[in-house]
Image (cartoon, grey):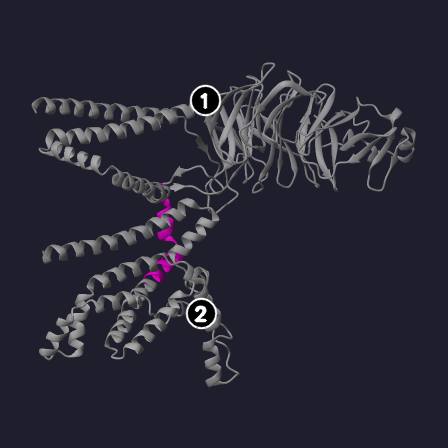
Amino acid sequence: MENKKKRSLIAFILCAAFTIVFAAAAGVLLSLAPKNEVLSSAQGTTVTRVARSYTEDSWYYGDSAGSLVKMSADGDEICRTTITEGRAIRSVASDPALNGLIVLDEDYNLFTVADSGDALTATFVRAFSGGYQSLAVDDEYVYFAVPASRYTQFVKYAKDDLAGEPLARGQMYTCFRQGGNYQFQPVISGTIVGMYVDDSYLYVVTGEGQYHRIAKDFSLNDFPFLSEEELAALGATVASNGTVTLPADSYDSALYRTARKQLAAKAAAFDAERGRFYIAGADGDFDALDLSFDEIEGFNVVLPNTPATGALAFHRESGTAYVAYENISGVTAIDVSGDAPAVLYQADVAFYITNMAVPAGGGRLLVICSGNNRDNPDYKELLSADIGTLANKGLLNGLGIAAVALAAVCAVGALFTALLVFRSGFSSRCRVVARGIGKNWIVYLIIFGSLAMLILFCYYPGISSMVLSFFDYTRTNPTMRFNNFENYIEIFTDPSNLIAFRNMLIFLLADVVIALVPPAVFALCLIFMRNKHYGTFARVVLFLPSVLPGIATLLIWTRGIYGVDGVLNMILRLFRGEVLEPVLFLQDHGIVSLIMMGFPFVGSYLIFYGALMNIPSSYYEAAELDGCKLFKRILWIDLPMITPQIKYVFILAFIQSVQNFSRVLMTTDGQFGTQIPIVLMYKRLQEGDYGLSSAYATLMFLVLIVVTIFNMKIKTQEMEAGS
C-alpha cells in the first residue's frame, strides 16, 4: 500500500512539474509569435495609401484627412504635411526615378512632394478633372493614364514640367489582326492593374487579361489626336465607335502590341532588373511574363486563394514578392530572384488587404486592411508586420497551442494523482468505478458519445460565444482583437439598448403571469366540470389552437385581428360608424398588442390539468368532511400539490420569453418602441458584428442561468426540508 502511495506521489510531482514546464513554454512561445503593430492615423481618419522610399529605409502613408506622413524604419513619425485639408489622399507614388513623391487627392488634384529628410513640402501642380488611373516614371518623363469619356488615354509630361502642356497623347486600344489589316478597338473603362516603363516601352497590365506594350511617344495609338490628313497618310479609317482600321504595311508591332491571355491579372509588379512582370491571377496562379508578355516556362506558383486586387508588393532589393488574398488573412512570400520561384512562407497577417509596401531595408511588411470601427464601415488600418519573424508565426502559434494542450493534460493528471495521494479511499472508489464501466461498457460508451456531441455542438459554441464577446470581430474585419469590456460598455451606454431591456422586463413579467394564471384557471374549471362529455369537448377545443404553426398564429393576429381591416377594427366600426379612422394597434399600442397575442392564453393547461387529476381523491373527501370551502381547497390543496408543475412552467415561460424574438421580429421589427435585446442580437449578427451580438447573447444567458440556479437552489432546499 505504501509503495502504491509513493508511486502516486512521484506521479503527482512529475505531472505538476510538467504542467508548470508546458505552461511556461506556452507563454514563451505565444509571446514570441509576431504581433501586427497597428499604426493609426489621426483621430477620426482612416489610412488610404502607403508607399516606400527608394532613397532611404523610410516610408509614407496618406490618410482621409489629407495628411501625408513620413515614418522611420522603426515605425516612428519623422514629419508630416497636409496635401489638401479634409480631402482624402487617393494615390501616393514613389519611384527610383523620382526625386520625391507624386500625390493625388480625392478630387484628382496632383501634387509633387519634396522630401528633405526631416520635412515634406507639397506643391500643387495640376488637376485631372476627368479622373486618374495610374502613372509610370522614367528618367525624363511621367506618363499618366486618365479616363476620357468611356475610354482610357495616356498623357506624357516632362518630369520637371508637370504643370506644362503634355508632350504626347495616346489612347489605349486592343490591337489584333483581321485579314490584311490591323484593328485598334478602344478599351472601354479598362481596369489598369499596373503601368510600368523601361528604356524602350510603356507597359500596361489590365484586369481583363490584356497586356499592352506601347511606344513611349504614342506614335501608333494617337489616332484621336491626328488630323484627317495624318490619318489618310497612314491609310487609317476610323469607325463611328472609335475603332481604327490600319493597313498591315502601316502597322509596326514595335510601336504598339496587345497580348490577350487567359491570365487575368488581379495584381502585378515589374522587375526592371530581371526584365519580367509578376502576375497574381484571378485563377489563383502566380506567373512571370517576359517583356514580350510571354509566360516564362516553369515560373508558376499555385496560390491558396484568389489574390486581392492590387495587393502585391515587390521588394526589389531582396527579390521577394508578397501576395495577399481576398478571403483569407494570409500573405505568401515568394522568392523570385532566381530562374524559378520558391515559396518562402505563408503567414497570417490581416483580412481584406487593399495596399502593401515593403521599405528598402526589407524589415517590415506594411499593409492597409479593414479596421474595427462601427461608426465608419470604410475605416482602414495600417498594420506593420515584422518580416524577420513572420515566417515563424504559424510554427510558434502551433507549438504554443500544443504546449497549452499538454499543460492541460498534465494538470488533469496532477489533479488525479493528488487525489490518490491525499484523499483516503479514492483509489478503491476508482477501482469500483472502473469495474462498473467495464461491466456496462456499452452503456457508458453511449453516454460518453452523447456527452461528446453535447460538448461539440452545445457547450463549445456557447463558451466560444462568451469568449468572442470580449473581442472586435466583424464580417468586414474577421481578425479577432481583444477589446476588454467595450462591447458591454456600448450595450449599457446606448439609450436604445436600455429601452430594449426595459421592454424585455415588461414582456417577461407579462409572459410569466400569462403562462401561470390563465392555464391554471382553465385546468381548475375542467376539474370542476361534472359532465364528462362536456369536459372532453372543452379539452379538445382548448388544445386545438396549439396545433397551429407559430408563424400562422402571428399572421392571424397581425393581419386578421390587429390589421386595418381586421376583426378589432371591424368591431369598432360596427359600434362607432364607418367614419372612424382605423386603429393601428401595433404602431400605437405596440407592447400591449404584442402581450395580448395568444388570448385567451390557454397555454400549458394540460400540465396543470394532469397534475390536478393525480391529486388523491382522499384529500378532497377529508376537506369536504372538515367543511373546507372551494376557495380554501384551491389555496391549501390544489395549488400546493401542483407546485412542481408551477415551477416547471415558470422556468419554461421565463426562458421562452427572453428568447422569443419572432414575436417582435415578425410583427414590428423592433419599431414603435417594441425593441428587445434578442432582436438587437439578431440584427447585429445579420450585420456581421459578431463580437457585439455575442455580448448580447452572453447577457441573456446570464439572466437565464441566474434564474435557473435560483430555482434549483429552492428546489434543493425543499427536498432537504422534506427529507
Mark 2 and mark 1 residues within 8 Å of each other at the beta carbon:
no
Residue 592 in the image: x percent, y percent?
38, 70
**Three-letter code for the amino acid on which mark 2 is drawn:** Trp
Q: Hey, what amino acid is under mark 1?
A: Ala
Q: What secondary structure is marked by label 2?
A: helix
Where's residue 61, x and y in %?
Answer: 54, 32
The mark that comes first in sequence, 2 or 1, is 1
| Residue 586 position by quadrant | bottom left
The label shown at residue 29 is: none
Give the SS element for disc 1. loop
Q: Which mark is residue 557?
A: 2
Magenta-colored span: 484-505
Residue in front for this viewpoint, 510 or 186:
510
**Between residues 289 and 31, which one lies in front from this camera angle?**
289
In the image, residue 27 sits, relative to residue 581, either above or below, namely: above
Which residue is disc 1 drawn over?
391
In the rendered image, residue 669, in percent from the top left (x then y), is placed at: 46, 60
Q: Residues within 10 Å of mark 2 (few under 14, many from 20)?
A: many
* Horizontal relation, residue 178 to residue 499: left or right: right
